[in-house]
Amino acid sequence: MRDAALLGARMLLGGYMLIHASQKLLGKFHGPGLEGAGALFEKNGLAPGKQMAASAAATEITGGLLTITGIANPAGPLAVAGAMSVAAAHNRKGGLMAARGGIELPVSYVTLALTLAAIGPGKYKIGPSLHPKLTTVGALAGGALAGALIARMVTAVPPAADEPAEPAPALAADEAAPAADAAATPAPPAPATPAEPAT
């Protein structure tokens, strides 16, 4: 039962990572595609945007496949945790809940990924796990990279908004007074039409 539950959790997490990657790269599942994802990355201080988006998608694909198969565990879940930590930092301004574009979903992915990394893949897996020393080195390197990307996003200066059009220059006081007087002067009444004589 435990091993089946771990396999289900791995397939869920890994499958969603593949979906996220296809949103970025191909625009599938209502995703923005590489152009849109690149523009979003640039807006959040991660430039060059298209290359960053492609790298994020590659991390999601690799982490997703390694998580599903259990190959080189815990490399897959750790890669997913790193990518989703950056996604959570991107969503930080939306608050806690996903309904407002908040951190709920990426934080849930991070939690599941770290849980799988700590517990292990169970017996339904392909290939051996990583050596503990390699796991430590990979976790430290991945954590440092994710931390650097998060710091870059948090400290990025937002792009300048388009400047509003300049207002029309105000009239000089001596020009404004006659214009105001003209506006305030009532129009002369129309001449009265004489009534027709009664017949």
Image: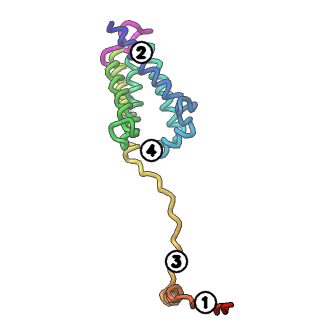
Real-space CA distance between mark 4 and mark 2, rounded to the nearest whole angstrom: 32 Å
Report the residue marked by disc 3.
169
Q: Mark 2: few, some, or many residues within 10 Å (few <14, many ≥20)?
A: some
Q: Which of marks 4 and 2 is in front?
A: 4
Q: Mark 4: few, some, or many residues within 10 Å (few <14, many ≥20)?
A: many
Residue type pointed to by label 4: Asn
Mark 2 or 3 closer to N-term?
A: 2
Real-space CA distance between mark 4 and mark 1, rounded to the nearest whole angstrom: 66 Å
Q: Position of residue 170 (x, y in %)?
A: 50, 79
Residue type pointed to by label 3: Pro
Tell me the residue at 37%/18% (across/down): 74
Tell me the residue at 40%/31% (across/down): 84
Decide if residue 128 is on the left or right side of residue 38. left
Highlighted range, magenta: 118-130
Residue type pointed to by label 2: Ala
Decide if residue 168 is on the left or right side of residue 107. right
Mark 2 element type: loop
Report the residue marked by disc 1.
190
Mark 4 or 2 closer to N-term?
A: 4
Tell me the residue at 38%/17% (across/down): 9
Q: Position of residue 67 (x, y in %)?
A: 42, 18
Report the residue marked by disc 2.
72
Q: Is residue 194 magenta?
A: no
